[in-house]
Amino acid sequence: MPLLNHLTELERKHQSLERQIQDALNHPSTDDVRLAELKRKKLQLKDEITKLKAHAPTVH
């Protein structure tokens, strides 16, 4: 089940980025460019997760 492992890893990375974004939002000194970069990466991961799940509907 390599696809399932890949999805699990992508979801783990997505959650990690969410935590990093929340930490950055809690620190006013966070650079806006860094925050935008984290959000962009999170969105890219979400898009990839969604695409993989759409191509493999039995994987959730």
Image: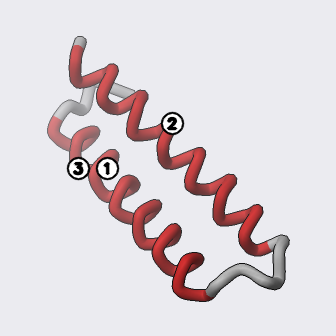
Q: Separation of disc 2 and disc 3 at Cα?
A: 16 Å
In this rendered view, identify the residue nearer to me: 54 or 47. Answer: 47
Left or right, 45 with respect to 54, comes to right
Residue furthest to the top in view is: 1
Query: Which residue position holds label 2?
Result: 12
- Amino acid type at image mark 2: Arg
Residue 9 position (above or below residue 1) = below
Query: Which residue position holds label 1?
Result: 50
Q: Separation of disc 2 and disc 1 at Cα?
A: 14 Å
Residue 15 position (above or below residue 46) = above
- Amino acid type at image mark 1: Thr
The secondary structure type at the circle numbered 2 is helix
Left or right, 28 with respect to 1, comes to right
Disc ID at residue 13: none
Query: Which residue position holds label 3?
Result: 51
Q: Position of residue 28 (x, y in %)?
A: 82, 83
Q: Position of residue 32 (x, y in %)?
A: 61, 87
Which residue is pictured at 48% across the width and 43% down the height? Answer: 13
Q: Quadrant of the C terminus?
A: top left
Disc on the earlier residue, 2 or 1: 2
